[in-house]
Image: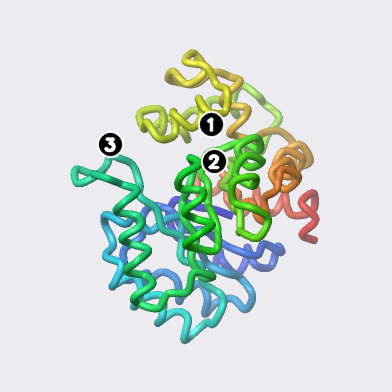
C-alpha cells in the first residue's frame, strides 16, 4: 500500500497483520530516511519502499548512506524508489533525464545495488532507463493499460509496481468527488497530463476536474470485490505488485485495507 506520508509503527503492525507485504512512503522524504527504521523495528516481514525520493531535494550521497544504514540493520526489507518529481515544483528542474542518470551514477559509486532501487517512470524513455539501471519501475497515477505498455518496454525480468488509488463505497458520485479531490493537483503537472493523453484520454478528459471516464480509470471505487477486481487488472497486465493508495482521509486507511484483504487473497 502507498501513503503520502509515512505510516506509524502501530499502523505498520496492523498492515502487516492483514497480510500486506509492503508500505510505500510518498511525499519526497528527506535524505536521512529516518522514518524507515521505526516501521521495520515494529514489524517482522513488512518491507518499506520510497515512492519517491526526489533527486532534486535529497543528495544521492546522503541517501546512499541512509540506504546502507537501513540495509545493515534490516537486510532486504528496504527498497529505494527515486524519481525526478515535477517541473512545476522545482525551480532547478532542467534536463531531468540527465539529472536522473547522474543521480543513478552517484548511487552506483556509493554501492547502492541496482536490485534494491526502482525508478518512478511514466514515459518510454524513463521506463527503459528503469529497467537498465534499477530493479524496475514504480509508475504513479496510471491505468492497467499503462501497465501493459510498461511491461512490454521493461521486459519480463524487471519489477513493475504501479500505484493505484481506491475509494471504498458504493456511492459513485461521492467516490468521484473524493477522487477528484485526491488528484486535483496533478492536472497542473505536464508529465501526468501527457501520460494520460498517451493512454488515449482526450483534452476534455484531462481538463480540470477530470471527466468521469478518467476518474473511474485512475481511481478504483465500489465494493471491496469491485476494487480488488480493478487492482487485479494491473496484475493481469504484467504488474508484479500494486501499491494501493486509500483516499478519503487518514482514518479510512486501515478500515479500507482491512475490507480489501480478503478479496485480494491476503487472508
**Residue 180 left/right relative to 233:** left
Can you see residue 9?
A: no
Q: Please tell me which residue lies in front, 70 or 126.
A: 126
Residue 129's place in the image compared with 87, above or below, is below
Task: Say which quadrant the N terminus sits in.
Answer: bottom right
Mark 1, residue position: 179
Residue ranking furthest to the top: 204
Q: Secondary structure at mark 3?
A: helix
Residue 127 percent coordinates (x, y): 51, 48
Q: Secondary structure at mark 1?
A: helix
Q: Secondary structure at mark 2?
A: loop
Residue at figure coordinates x 52%, y 76% from the top left = 40
Structural distance between the alpha carbons of marks 3 and 1: 22 Å
Mark earlier in primary sequence (2, 1): 1
Mark 3, residue position: 88
Mark earlier in primary sequence (3, 2): 3
Q: Which label lies toward us, 3 or 1? A: 3
Structural distance between the alpha carbons of marks 2 and 1: 7 Å
Residue at figure coordinates x 71%, y 64% from the top left = 19
Residue at figure coordinates x 76%, y 36% from the top left = 226
Mark 2, residue position: 247
Residue 3's disc is: none
For disc 3, the neighbor class at 10 Å (few under 14, some 14 to 19, many from 20) is few
**Residue 46 left/right relative to 48:** right
Residue ranking furthest to the left: 91
For disc 1, the neighbor class at 10 Å (few under 14, some 14 to 19, many from 20) is many
Task: Say which quadrant the C terminus sits in.
Answer: bottom right
Amino acid at each position: 500500500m502507498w501513503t503520502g506520508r509515512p505510516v506509524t509503527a502501530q499502523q505498520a503492525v496492523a498492515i502487516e497483520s492483514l497480510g500486506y507485504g509492503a508500505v510505500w512512503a510518498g511525499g519526497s522524504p528527506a535524505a536521512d530516511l529516518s522514518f524507515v527504521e521505526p516501521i521495520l523495528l515494529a514489524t517482522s516481514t513488512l518491507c518499506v519502499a520510497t515512492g519517491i525520493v526526489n533527486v532534486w531535494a535529497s543528495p544521492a550521497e546522503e541517501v546512499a548512506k541512509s540506504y546502507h544504514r537501513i540495509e545493515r540493520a534490516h537486510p532486504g526489507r528496504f527498497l529505494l524508489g527515486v524519481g525526478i518529481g515535477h517541473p512545476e515544483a522545482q525551480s532547478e528542474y532542467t534536463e531531468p533525464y540527465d539529472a536522473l542518470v547522474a543521480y543513478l551514477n552517484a548511487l552506483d559509486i556509493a554501492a547502492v545495488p541496482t536490485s534494491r532501487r526502482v525508478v518512478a517512470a511514466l514515459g518510454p524513455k524513463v521506463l527503459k532507463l528503469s529497467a537498465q539501471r534499477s530493479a524496475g519501475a514504480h509508475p504513479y497515477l496510471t491505468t492497467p493499460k499503462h501497465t501493459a505498455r510498461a511491461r512490454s518496454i521493461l521486459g519480463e525480468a524487471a519489477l513493475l509496481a504501479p500505484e493505484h488509488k481506491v475509494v471504498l463505497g458504493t456511492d459513485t458520485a461521492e467516490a468521484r468527488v473524493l477522487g477528484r479531490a485526491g488528484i486535483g493537483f496533478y492536472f497542473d503537472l505536464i508529465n501526468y497530463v501527457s501520460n494520460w493523453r498517451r493512454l488515449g484520454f482526450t483534452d476534455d478528459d484531462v481538463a480540470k476536474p477530470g471527466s468521469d471516464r478518467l476518474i473511474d480509470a485512475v481511481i478504483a471505487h465500489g465494493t471491496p470485490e469491485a476494487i480488488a477486481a480493478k487492482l487485479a487488472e494491473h496484475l493481469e497486465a504484467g504488474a508484479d505488485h500494486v501499491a494501493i493508495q486509500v483516499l478519503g482521509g487518514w482514518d479510512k486507511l486501515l478500515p479500507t485495507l482491512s475490507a480489501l484483504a480478503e478479496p485480494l487473497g491476503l487472508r
